[in-house]
Image (cartoon, grey):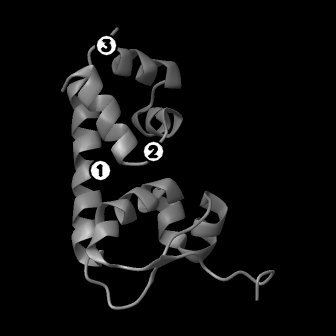
Amino acid sequence: MTAAEFKIKRERLGVSGRWLADRVGVLDRQVRRWESGVAPVPADVVKFVDDLDAEAGELARKLRGASRPLVSYRNDGEFWAADGDAEARALPASFYRAVLGRIFDSGVSVVYPVVADEA
């Protein structure tokens, strides 16, 4: 995977360089080195990103054609409060927004959750 492909895939997944660095056990500056082409992307990191991309694709396939509006979250706190499993897996809300972006053109409606202050 080239440096450019790596950065595009990370951005497509909606995860920050810092989030990725935390998951693969490096400093965020190492992710910047990979993305700039200063250092090659290790095979295990490529596999991690590819696996995450496959997970996003599978989730997008499951959500495509939903008959009810899908919920998107404004931030991680709101997301984790609604979905304890996601916090345990430490996926950011931006990942799910990126998944929803993959199916946005399929006619699925996306809304924010109603919070007590807005009701």
How far apart marks 1 and 2 lie (CA) works out to: 10 Å
N-terminal of the pair, mark 1 or mark 2, is 2
Q: Which amino acid lies under the numbered mark 3 shown in the image of this protein? A: Gly
- Say whether residue 92 is visible: no
For residue 44, above or below residue 118: above
Residue 17's x, y, as percent? Answer: 47, 33
User: Which labelled disc corresponds to residue 37?
Assistant: 3
Determine whether the residue tagged by mark 3 lies in a helix, strand or loop: loop
N-terminal of the pair, mark 2 or mark 3, is 2
Determine whether the residue tagged by mark 1 lies in a helix, strand or loop: helix
- Say whether residue 84 is visible: yes
**Where does label 1 land, which residue?**
52
**Where does label 2 land, which residue?**
15
Q: Which amino acid lies under the numbered mark 1 shown in the image of this protein? A: Leu
Q: Residues within 10 Å of mark 3 (few under 14, many from 20)?
A: some
Residue at image location 31% in from the left, 85% down from the top: 66
For residue 14, side relative to residue 44 (left or right): right
For residue 20, above or below residue 57: above
User: Residues at badges 1 and 2 in contact (C-beta under 8 Å)?
Assistant: yes
Residue 96's x, y, as percent? Answer: 43, 62
Q: Residues within 10 Å of mark 1 (few under 14, many from 20)?
A: some
Quarter in which the C terminus is drawn:
bottom right
Q: Which amino acid lies under the numbered mark 2 shown in the image of this protein? A: Val
Residue lying furthest top in this view?
Answer: 38
Residue at image location 39% in from the left, 40% down from the top: 11
User: Residues at badges 3 and 1 in contact (C-beta under 8 Å)?
Assistant: no
Residue at image location 71% in from the left, 80% down from the top: 115
How far apart marks 2 and 3 lie (CA) works out to: 19 Å
How far apart marks 3 and 1 lie (CA) works out to: 21 Å
Residue at image location 50% in from the left, 40% down from the top: 19
